[in-house]
Image (cartoon, rainbow, N blue to C red):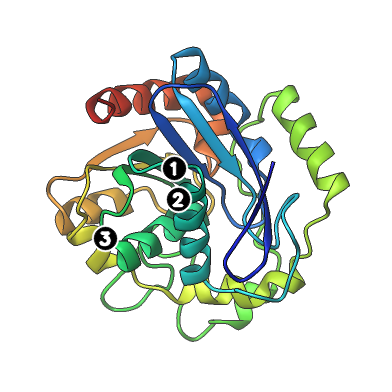
């Protein structure tokens, strides 16, 4: 299905199932097909599931416009409005979680009843105040390091059906990393610690024990910022926690959804 944003960019989305709505927000360079195991689990448990490709990714329009987290957050708000969704749980993976932090910074609670962060530190750049950024990225290397290959994101193999779905989507709509570089820089530049500290909805942060991108100890730092935050490390998982260890992740997500959904 297609949705046109207020700045006239076409987004591709899927809206499946019924019941309480759950929005799944993909990471940088990813397509909505990565959510295949999560979506199947949620649909089987009677939830409505919305997935979409961010602008400049997947089957959505590839454009120079809106290469910033704030615009991606507005896209989420407008998509939910178009679907008449006033209450939902949002689950963001990587940059998708940052998109939702941006959403909260712009709209407060907005349409959210809860938020799940999958393997995304609230601050990407390491400095004297924060030691849990993206790999060893520091102000000395920023932004030049983002032009280099980021390296493998996973620690274990993802199931063949999900890999096949992602490959097919990527073949049909190739991702141009260089065309999204300005967005990657904007994403990495942000510091969402104030948003995490003052999160207006129930908040769950999940990290992969073997994530190549983030030290899972960032969860402890999140809980220092916000003592109400729930945290969970998933064993033997890399950055794509929900796809690498779907059974374990779905169990964690399922317990959290039960606390949120009416």
The residue at the point 53 percent across, 27 percent down is 38
Tally of marks: 3
The residue at the point 74 percent across, 23 percent down is 161
- Mark 3 and mark 1: span between their CA atoms? 18 Å
> Label 2 neighbourhood size at 10 Å, few (<14), some (14-19), many (20+)?
few
Considering every residue shown, the one lying at the far right of the view is: 171
Q: Quadrant of residue 249?
A: top left
Residue 70 x/y as whole percent: 46, 70
Q: Earlier in the sequence, mark 3 or mark 2?
A: 2
Measured along the vertical axis of the image, is residue 177 above or below residue 253? below
Q: Quadrant of the N terminus?
A: top right
Residues at discs 3 and 2 in contact (Cβ within 8 Å): no
From the image, tell me which residue sits under label 3.
108
Q: Select label 3 or label 1 by which is in front.
A: 1
Residues at discs 1 and 2 in contact (Cβ within 8 Å): yes
- Residue 34 lies left or right of residue 179; in this view the side is left
Q: Earlier in the sequence, mark 3 or mark 1?
A: 1
Q: Is residue 197 visible?
A: yes
Residue 170 x/y as whole percent: 81, 46
Measured along the vertical axis of the image, is residue 19 above or below residue 2? above
Residue 17 x/y as whole percent: 53, 22
The residue at the point 40 percent across, 56 percent down is 100
From the image, tell me which residue sits under label 2.
81
């Amino acid at each position: 299905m297609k949705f046109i944003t207020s700045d006239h960019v076409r987004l591709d989305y899927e809206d499946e199932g019924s019941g309480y709505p759950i929005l799944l927000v993909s990471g940088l360079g990813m397509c909505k097909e990565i959510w295949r195991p999560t979506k199947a689990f949620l649909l089987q448990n009677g939830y409505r599931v919305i997935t979409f490709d961010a602008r400049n990714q997947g089957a959505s329009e590839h454009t120079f416009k809106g290469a910033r987290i704030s615009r991606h957050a507005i896209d989420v708000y407008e998509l939910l409005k178009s679907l008449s969704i006033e209450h939902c749980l949002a689950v963001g993976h990587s940059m998708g979680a940052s998109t939702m932090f941006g959403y909260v910074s712009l709209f407060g609670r907005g349409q959210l009843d809860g938020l799940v962060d999958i393997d995304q530190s609230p601050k990407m750049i390491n400095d004297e105040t924060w030691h849990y950024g993206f790999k060893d990225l520091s102000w000395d290397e920023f932004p030049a390091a983002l032009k280099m290959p980021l390296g493998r994101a996973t620690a274990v193999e993802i199931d063949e059906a999900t890999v096949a779905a992602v490959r097919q989507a990527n073949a049909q709509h190739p991702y141009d990393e260089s065309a999204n570089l300005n967005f990657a820089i904007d994403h990495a530049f942000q510091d969402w610690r104030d948003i995490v500290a003052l999160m207006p909805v129930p908040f769950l942060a999940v990290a992969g024990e073997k994530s190549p991108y983030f030290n899972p100890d960032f969860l402890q730092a999140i809980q220092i910022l916000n003592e109400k935050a729930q945290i969970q490390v998933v064993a033997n998982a890399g950055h794509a926690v929900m796809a690498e260890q779907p059974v374990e992740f779905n169990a964690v997500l399922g317990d959290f959804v039960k606390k949120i959904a009416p």
